[in-house]
Amino acid sequence: MTGPCAKAIVRCTIVSVDGRIFNGDNSCQNPQPVCPRSPGDGYEKCVSICQQESHAEVSALRVAGSAAIGARAYVEGRSYSCRKCQEALFGAGVESISISAPKVWQKNG
C-alpha cells in the first residue's frame, strides 16, 4: 500500500509545450507514521525504510517521457528542488523549474 511521506508531501507537475499535464509525487511503498530521518540525515532512509522509489520530480519525468522536452516543471511542498532532481529535469529537456503551484490549477469563479 502506497502512502504519503511522513515528513513532506511533495508534488511535481510538468506542463508540456502543448499543454499536457504530468504529475509525480514522493509517495512511499512503506509509509511511516513518523519520519525515520534525523536532522542532517540524507535520503538513504527514504529508500531503505520508507521504500520511496523517487522524488516527485523524477516520478513526474517517468510519466512525461519525451513530452518533458521544452516543458515547465512546478514543484509544490518544498522550498527547493534538490540538485539531483534539477539535473534530472534539465537533462530531460525541461526548460524551467518553479517552486510554486502551477497556474494551470487555478480556476476563476
Image: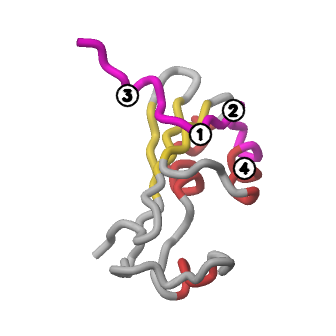
Distance Cα–Cα, label 4 vs label 1: 12 Å
Give the quarter of the figure containing the N terminus.
bottom left
Classify 10 Å Cα crowding around label 3: few (below 14), some (14-19), many (20 and above). Answer: few
In what element is the residue under mark 3? helix
Per the rendered image, the range of residues in magenta is 90-109
Q: Amino acid at mark 4?
A: Gln
Image point (68%, 36%), residue name: 94
Q: Amino acid at mark 2?
A: Ser
Which of the two discs, 4 and 1, sits closer to the camera? 1
Distance Cα–Cα, label 1 vs label 2: 10 Å
The correct choice, above or below, for 52 with respect to 91 in the image is below
- Whether residues under marks 1 and 3 lie with C-beta atoms below 8 angstroms apart, the answer is no
The correct choice, above or below, for 105 with respect to 62 in the image is above
Q: Which residue is mark 2?
A: 96
Judge whether residue 108 is colored magenta.
yes
Task: Residue 99: give its label.
Answer: 1
Q: Of the two numbered discs 1 and 3 on the same chain, state the one appearing first in sequence.
A: 1
Classify 10 Å Cα crowding around label 1: few (below 14), some (14-19), many (20 and above). Answer: some
Q: Amino acid at mark 1?
A: Ile
Q: Which residue is mark 3?
A: 105
In what element is the residue under mark 1? loop
- Whether residues under marks 4 and 1 lie with C-beta atoms below 8 angstroms apart, the answer is no
Which of the two discs, 1 and 3, sits closer to the camera? 1
Q: Amino acid at mark 3?
A: Trp
The correct choice, above or below, for 107 with respect to 33 in the image is above
Image point (46%, 24%), residue name: 103
